[in-house]
Image: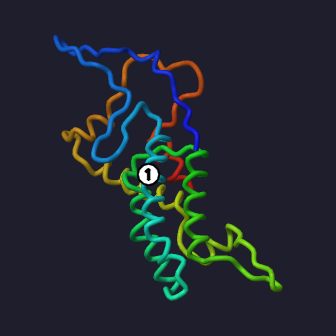
């Protein structure tokens, strides 16, 4: 999964607040999440890699013919999906990010449900067959529900809390030339229209 690195040339090197001067950092890890300049792709790749390690640790159990399919899907929902969607209520998903997440989920579901035999020939299950057997929302819908839940929590927070102050702050300056970055609140607005 290639990540396009953005040039940070248009960002200042230092930020001055009163008498204090702070170095501008473009990326750092906070509470296990990668925080950077409004590009969530690196964080999503990190989550997919962590979930992939979890998936490979459980692969023997997910492929076992002795385990019921309901138990396998519950294992995915309880052990793998939370690793994949950690802090996803704050993500802004692009189409490529949605595609990466969907590819990972379908790989896990194919491991759980296996191949299908038709007229003596084995074939991979189609995507719609996987989701019919899974009988739950796909990963992108799951993340959008989490994002709406986080938006509801944000609206209930009092105006004195730092979280609400940051949300209501409008940054100074102008946006760079070109297509604007995806914003979290725009994603929430799209989620409410579905």
Q: Quadrant of the C terminus?
A: bottom right
User: How busy is the neighbourhood of tag 1: few (under 14 within 10 Å), some, or many (20 plus)?
Assistant: many
- Looking at the picture, tell me which residue is in the foreground, 184 or 55: 55
In the rendered image, residue 40, in percent from the top left (x then y), is placed at 46, 40
The residue positioned 40% from the left and 47% from the top of the image is 90
Please identify the residue farthest to the top as the structure is shown. 19
- Looking at the picture, tell me which residue is in the foreground, 137 or 149: 137
Q: Does dot 1 land on a helix, a strand or a loop?
A: helix
In the rendered image, residue 23, in percent from the top left (x then y), is placed at 28, 19
Report the residue marked by disc 1. Answer: 47
The residue positioned 33% from the left and 25% from the top of the image is 25
Q: Quadrant of the N terminus?
A: top right
The residue positioned 42% from the left and 30% from the top of the image is 37
Q: Is residue 6 left or right of residue 35?
A: right
State whether residue 27 is above or below residue 118: above
Please identify the residue farthest to the right as the structure is shown. 119
Q: Is residue 48 left or right of residue 114?
A: left
Q: Is residue 113 left or right of residue 172?
A: right
In the rendered image, residue 166, in percent from the top left (x then y), is placed at 29, 35
In the rendered image, residue 114, in percent from the top left (x then y), is placed at 63, 77
- Which image quadrant for residue 165? top left
């Amino acid at each position: 999964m290639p990540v396009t690195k953005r040039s940070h040339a248009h960002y200042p090197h230092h930020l001055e607040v009163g008498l204090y001067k702070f170095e501008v950092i473009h990326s750092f890890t906070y509470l296990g999440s990668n925080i950077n300049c409004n590009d969530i792709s690196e964080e999503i790749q990190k989550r997919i890699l962590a979930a992939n390690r979890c998936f490979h640790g459980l692969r023997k159990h997910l492929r076992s013919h002795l385990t019921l399919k309901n138990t396998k899907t519950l294992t995915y929902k309880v052990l793998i999906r939370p690793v994949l969607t950690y802090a996803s209520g704050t993500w802004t998903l692009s189409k490529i990010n949605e595609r990466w997440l969907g590819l990972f989920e379908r790989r896990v579901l194919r491991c759980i449900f296996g191949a299908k035999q038709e007229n003596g020939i084995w074939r991979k299950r189609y995507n719609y067959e996987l989701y019919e057997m899974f009988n739950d929302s796909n990963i992108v819908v799951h993340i959008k529900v989490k994002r709406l839940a986080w938006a509801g929590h944000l609206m209930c927070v009092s105006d004195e809390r730092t979280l609400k102050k940051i949300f209501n702050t409008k940054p100074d300056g102008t946006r760079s030339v070109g297509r604007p970055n995806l914003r979290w609140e725009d994603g929430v607005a799209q989620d409410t229209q579905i």
